[in-house]
Amino acid sequence: MTTYDLVLAHGRVIDPETGLDAVRDVGVNGGVIQAVSDQPLDGVTTVDATGLVVSPGFIDLHSHSMDVAGHRLQALDGVTTVLELEAGAYPVAAAYRRAEIEGRPLNYGFATSWAVARMAVLLGLDTSGDLRDDFLANIGREEWQRAAPRNVVDRIVGMLERDLGDGALGIGILVGYAPRVDPSEYLAVAALAARVGLPTYTHARELVEMDPATPIDGAEEIVRAAAETGAHMHYCHVNSTSIRHVDRVLGLVEKVRAEGSRVTTEAYPYGAGMTGVGAAFLAPELLHRRGLTPHSIGLLGAEGRIPDADTLRRVRESEPGSAAFVHLLDEDDPAQFDYIQRALTFTDAAVATDAVPLLWRSEAPDPFSWPLGPDAVTHPRTAGTYGRTLRRLVRQNGVLSLPEAVRRCTLIPADVVGSGVPAMRRKGRVQAGCDADLTVFDPETVSDRATYTETVRHSTGFVHVLVGGQFVVRDEYLLPTALPGRAVRA
């Protein structure tokens, strides 16, 4: 009889690819699932998972919380792989190198960054591959947001192509932060992605309903690029860029899919977004386009919201990279939450967090210290997206079955990335030969706890989280010394 390093015994195993949903034992050796059996397995270590769900580890396509502290908070929400794909990093080799040297609790990966490459060219920026130092520090500078001549576009595309050669998982395109660039530049970037067989990950520019003078409707731009170039276009956080126009946007995506284009989507279950307060679309004179006022915006870690347009202008000038809540919809209002829910339940939509880097109200502590101190702040979606999805959409609202919710947190994101990234084909599944990235949770109690005032309260009900067969969370306790995360590269 084979003896395994680890056996998860008697759990309800959900494998979204094969449709398995039954009590099984899972045997792990050397960081790989070796057996999924309806017969008892023998293990050096055996963990009783009776009454618990054993699922693939959750894969977050859209996390900006890429340091050790952020990984730990996401691990307690069931995540085993975090990917920075929407903003990306440039140069991507520097981002990978930093993570490898420091170590990470979770698997990690990066797209290359169109926005930062553009900043490097148009601002003369010496880029580091760090989101805060590169993108957020320069988010409000208009020089990088302007239309560029063809020779400059060609230079930017060449830089991105070299970064793809260094293992980037695709191209992150923050066109929503430079909404006046020429649509031909977007098509050139999409054409590059099509040539190399990797996706683009887009923060869309404004919809025509929000800005009738936009060079191109943000949703039309994404689906047109898919049709014209053949690229796989991933539509990031469709809930927060579409808001009350989500049905029109999703209808458009559905139409082009039926015609053969590959456009995928993601959403998160919160009504407030978060970004640098210097973002172009948060200019006081533009807020009405989204039905907002300055009072819809609150700086992370500050008391109250911004009272008026003059205060907002001052903050945007003095600290444009400061993280700000943008309250788009009231998720406690069932009618408004329904817009969010429709984005989350759209055909094959992935659940993704848009997790925000942790900030500290005072001097940052040792980045490896745990637990987080009272000064740590973030968006509650960093800590609670998956717990909230399981609580609200499965247990309370009943709009997703548990196996379908698991699929949207695991197999769907693995397949979004996986066409050009063989390593992802071993994730998002509970099958022999797949990576032992596993999340074990109590379906009756799993829940988010983070709020807009207590932003780093970790989720509950995620009993065990394993990365490469190693416990990062055991018996609902994070193991601070566990750093088993490995790079995911194209």
Image (tube, rainbow, N blue to C red):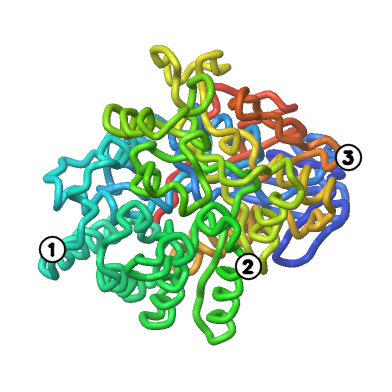
Mark 2 and mark 1 in contact? Answer it, CB < 8 Å: no
Residue drawn at (50%, 49%), measured in percent from left and top?
A: 62
Residue 181 location, quadrant: bottom left
Residue 455 vs residue 246, the one in the foreground: 246
Q: Nearer the viewer, mark 3 or mark 1?
A: 1
Residue position marked by numbered label 2 in the rendering: 247
- Sequence-wise, which precedes: disc 3 or disc 1? 3
Q: Compute the Cα span from label 3 to label 1.
A: 59 Å
The numbered dot on residue 152 is 1
Taking the image as shown, residue 239 lies to the left or right of residue 219, namely right
Q: Amino acid at mark 2?
A: Asp
Position in image of residue 385 (x %, y %): 64, 42
Which residue occupies 60% across, 33% down?
380
Q: Which residue is mark 3?
A: 50
**Three-letter code for the amino acid on which mark 3 is drawn:** Thr
- Viewer-proximal residue, 199 or 6? 199
Asked whether residue 53 appears in the rendered view, the answer is yes
Position of residue 94 measured from the top left corner of the image (x, y, whole percent)? 27, 42
Q: Is residue 2 visible?
A: no
Quarter in which the C terminus is drawn: bottom left
